[in-house]
Amino acid sequence: MKIKILLFSVFILGCSFQASMAQSPEQKLKELGLEIPEISQPMANYVKWKQVGNMLYLAGNGPDVFGKVGADLTPEEGYQAARETGLEIIAVLKAATGDLSKIKQFVKVLGMVNSTPDFTGHPAVINGFSDLMVEVFGEKGKHARSAVGVAALPNNIAVEIEVIVELEEQ
């Protein structure tokens, strides 16, 4: 019996140590050499985020990359545009929460790709966003997702991404 209690205590201590050694999203960004940009003001009569309970809903964000994937941009350039959009979304999340560690999990992502009618690689483009979220947030960054092609996006941006996250209980 004493051996079981001892083993259980060692297990709990190990888990506590491992949890304390986990990197925060801010530390992970620094390790990756990434900086989050300043957030811009909304382009119209809306807000960048809305919190309802412990759910945080973000308005669509896009990069400073313009054109249609499949005509003006390669799929790889689209991927990078989605990754850039991910940094902008992280900046909005930081502004909304004050601390990225308050994010319990990413729940749902809608990725829209400004693309030609015959382009079908939308999921590969939006992977630029999804890959970055997992790099920065680990398992918390995994999410349900839709990736769709659209005829046009505001100001001809290459991608637009909406996000819903769950926050830790206060």
Image (cartoon, grey):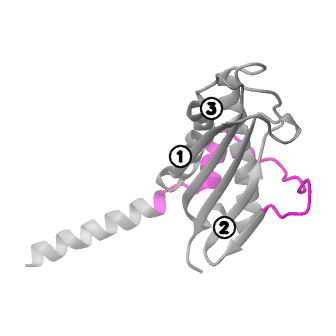
- SS assignment at label 2: strand
How far is the residue under mark 1 from the one under mark 3? 15 Å
Q: Mark 3 points at which residue?
A: 125
Residue lying at 49% horizontally and 56% vertically, measured from the top left: 22
Quarter of the image for residue 128 reads top right
Residue type (three-letter) at the residue carrying disc 1: Val
Residue lying at 70% horizontally and 72% vertically, measured from the top left: 51
Q: Name the residue under label 2.
A: 56
Residue lying at 68% horizontally and 45% vertically, measured from the top left: 86
Which part of the image, by quadrant, shows the N terminus?
bottom left
Dominant secondary structure of the residues highlighted in magenta in the image: loop
User: Badge 1: how crowded within 10 Å, few (<14), some, or many (20+)?
Assistant: some
How far is the residue under mark 2 from the one under mark 1? 18 Å
How far is the residue under mark 3 from the one under mark 2? 24 Å
Using the image, determine if residue 75 lies above or below residue 12: above
Q: Where is residue 158 in the image (x, y as percent from the top left)?
A: 76, 33
User: Badge 2: how crowded within 10 Å, few (<14), some, or many (20+)?
Assistant: many
Q: Is residue 34 magenta?
A: yes
